[in-house]
Amino acid sequence: MEETILDAALERILQVGIRRASLDDIARRAGVNRVTIYRRFRVKESLVDAVLQREIGRVLTEVGQITASTPGLSAQIEEAALFIIRQTRTHPLVTQLLTVVPEEAVEFYTVRGKDLVGLGIWYIDGILRRSQQHGLIDAYDPQPVAEFLARFAHSLLLTPLGGVNFEDDRLAREFVRSAIVPIVEHGLTVRPEPN
């Protein structure tokens, strides 16, 4: 039942945006009454959060599948980073919302940016810690690296063009290979400021 509600909510959000997606519309699409939705989610914001978390979960599951099927640690990091970079440009919650309700999409991704970045930090930190426990990457404090990578992904979501053209797969791969892979494998080196 919950999956059906989340599917209906996602479909409606992609059609009209978050603000105009009413619980009545979502209930009709899901084939349930509004009370059923209220019992599970209480308020529309909780339903939107559940939709967002499910979509992020789907992306992260795909990242896990990519790393599991790619030989070699450096190649795993590279392919996972490239996949996430592509998702910031191609996922329907980005592209469709920007097409249908651009002002709302920008507001959502900036106002809710704290939640998105926080979820990214938590997930990346977990991966880095597990990788360190298995001796795959150097021992370092994973929190700054996790924060750096989560903020990088969020920045690409909000500002896809700037220096490197990440729409060019060759340039994106070169950037990931020279910048992201070493950071994940060895951590961030903080140099003391000169006196």
Image (tube, helix red, strand yellow):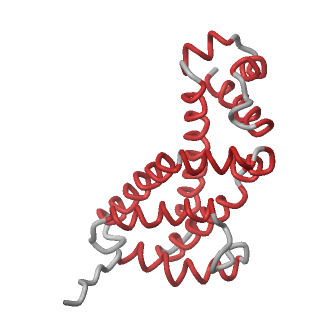
What residue lies at 37% left-to-right and 58% top-to-bottom? Answer: 125
Classify 105 as above or below 173. Answer: above
194 and 6: which is toward the camera: 194
Count the numbered circles shown: 0
Q: Quadrant of residue 7?
A: top right
Q: Quadrant of residue 132?
A: bottom left
Classify 94 as above or below 49. Answer: below
Q: Is residue 81 left or right of residue 172?
A: left
140 and 21: which is toward the camera: 21
Q: Of all residues shown, which one is farthest toward the left?
A: 195
Report x, y in % for residue 6.
Answer: 65, 30
Q: Is residue 17 left or right of residue 35?
A: right
Report x, y in % for residue 189.
Answer: 31, 80
86 and 154: which is toward the camera: 154
Classify 110 as above or below 147. Answer: above
Report x, y in % for residue 57.
Answer: 55, 45
Report x, y in % for residue 186.
Answer: 35, 78
What residue lies at 35% left-to-right and 76% top-to-bottom? Answer: 188
What residue lies at 23% left-to-right and 90% top-to-bottom? Answer: 194
Q: Of all residues shown, which one is farthest toward the bottom?
A: 194
Quarter of the C terminus within the rendering: bottom left
